Image (cartoon, helix red, strand yellow):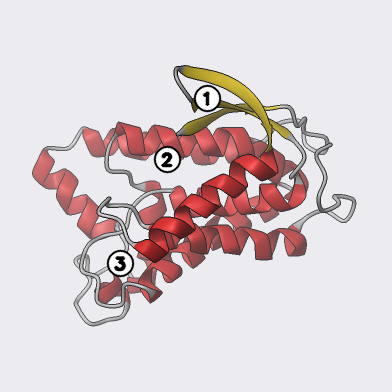
Amino acid sequence: MFLPLHDTNPIRHVSMPVVNYGLIGITILIFLAQVALPQPAFDRATIEFGMIPIVVRDLYPQPLPWLPDWATLVTYAFLHADWLHLLTNMLFLWVFGDNIEDALGHVCYLIFYVACAVLAALAHLLFNLDGNGPLIGASGAVAGVMGAYILLYPHARVFVLARIVIPIPLPVPAFWMLGFWIATQLFYALLGSDEPVAWWAHLGGFAAGLALAPLLKRGDVRLWGGR
């Protein structure tokens, strides 16, 4: 229903969010490598590096014997199914990630992003214990960034492309935009949906962001800011 275009929240502590740019760049490069593969190899890479619950639980052997079962709790976040999947995640990361890197610092932001990816995957696993399909995509980690953003900068203005009659850009407080997003995820997670979306990974990542941001933020960054 909407896409974030940009926010009005300047960065104050870092000259450039190099980790956020790096994560976006690496993720795009990996996807370009994916799409360069023949379809059978593309599908095989998804199975080998995606997070499969029964593999992580050691109920089924890892497709790549040299790769530890737990490693896919991270590698899955750098794979995507198609261009729309990739670009949507990278757009959200572009809009919100720079401010979270600014609030946490470069090293803590990288730790934060990876931790959110892992915790999002574990949330998905918890609600899909016998799942045999691969979880892929950065959306769990990006949801963590969004969780941190709503906690640190709920009053920041975010311009979103909202489809009412025709798509138009509207400035809304981050709290309402991200609050609506998480409410939508919870709605579909609880009521069920036929869409192939990892709702619980989104919720787990968002909760991880809420929990980790206060622990990893700089001391002079206050909660509930962004005015």
Label 1, label 3: how far apart the Cα atoms are: 41 Å
The residue drawn where x is 43% and y is 48% is 138
Q: Amino acid at mark 2?
A: Thr
SS at circle 1? strand
203 to 169, vertically: above or below: below
Q: Is residue 134 visible to us here?
A: yes
In the image, 208: left or right of 44?
right
Query: In front: mark 1 or mark 3?
Result: 1
Return the x and y of residue 174 as percentages of the image width and height: 68, 40
Looking at the image, which residue sits at the far front? 165
Label whose residue precedes the other's in the sequence (1 or 2): 2
Is 45 left, or right, of 223 in this rendering? left
| Earlier residue among tags 3 and 2 | 2
**Foreground residue among 89 and 47:** 89
Residue 40, position in %: x, y? 9, 45
Circle 2 packing at 10 Å, graded few (<14), some (14-19), many (20+), is many
- Distance between mark 1 and mark 2 Cα atoms: 24 Å
Q: Which residue is mark 3?
A: 67
Image check: 214 left or right of 178? right
Which amino acid does the dot numbered 1 rest on? Answer: Leu
For discs 3 and 2, the disc positioned in front in the rendered view = 2
User: Which residue in the structure is indicated by mark 1?
Assistant: 161
Q: Residues within 10 Å of mark 1 (few under 14, many from 20)?
A: some
Q: Which mark is residue 27?
A: 2
In what quadrant of the picture does the N terminus appear? top left
